[in-house]
Image: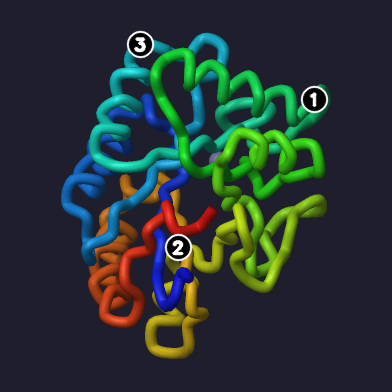
Amino acid sequence: MLGKSALVTCHAEQPLDGEAWRRLRDLLRRRPGGYTIVPLLRPPDAGEDEATWLARAREAAGLGPIGLHTHWTSATHARPTDGDPAGRVSRELAWLRGHGLEPRLFCGGGWYTDDQVQAVVADAGLVDCTATTFTPPVPPPYRRVDGPSPGLLPTTHSLGMLARSLVGSLPDVVHVYFHDTELRDARRRLALLAALPLLSRRRRPLNIDSVN
Ligand SMILES: [Zn+2]
């Protein structure tokens, strides 16, 4: 039973960006509102610095659970443009595990998903966070659902949506996401640091071990 609980994840789009990484690491350590923020990491693309990426991912993994955030086309183009989306997820999972990193959550870039990707994620034992309870600002395919189910922990709120919902109704299970790149903006950082303690009065931290 998940009960009235909340999960906070960060789509780590630019883990090689020094400021975005420092701000994210600070949040992982501070645990605002008592939440263990789960970074969903985009693995390095061709030409990106793997050694620095791995050092940062290992540091994040030492602070709590981590997840995989696949960008199919490039750092700045999340959705697939061709090829084999499920194959890329398989390769990234194998690469992470080959480097001693064990992601617990998965979120497809640009909210993209398909049956094969979902099967790879489920077979790997990851909790899928790609589905949303809101209509995402992208064209189909995306997966819209009403709430959690076994192996699925849909994303329910962006930071802006949470700020508006804190004065109103919240679903039993709240899953807030933000981007590491948002942390470079002082106003957004402050909004997050203000919102999470307020959220914690209404939703206790969700234990991802209770999802599967
Ligand atoms: Zn992304």
For the point 51% across and 80% down, which residue is it? 171
Q: Left or right: 20 with respect to 141?
A: left
Q: Residues within 10 Å of mark 1 (few under 14, many from 20)?
A: few
- The answer to whether mark 2 and mark 3 are in CB contact below 8 A is no
Residue 76: quarter of image = top right
At which x and y percent is residue 93?
56, 25
Three-letter code, disc 3: Ala
Is label 2 in a helix, a strand or a loop? Answer: strand
Three-letter code, disc 2: Val
Residue at the bottom extreme of this rendering: 168
Residue 84: quarter of image = top right
| Quadrant of the image where one finds ligand 1 | top right
Q: Is mark 1 within 8 Å of ligand 1?
A: no
**Among the two numbered marks 1 and 2 on one chain, the one whose residue lies closer to the N terminus:** 1
Query: Label 2, on which residue?
Result: 176
At which x and y percent is residue 172?
48, 79
Q: Nearer the viewer, residue 62 or 12?
A: 62
Query: Label 3, on which residue?
Result: 51
Q: Is residue 127 above or below residue 158?
A: above
Query: Label 1, on which residue?
Result: 84
Q: Left or right: 185 with respect to 88?
A: left
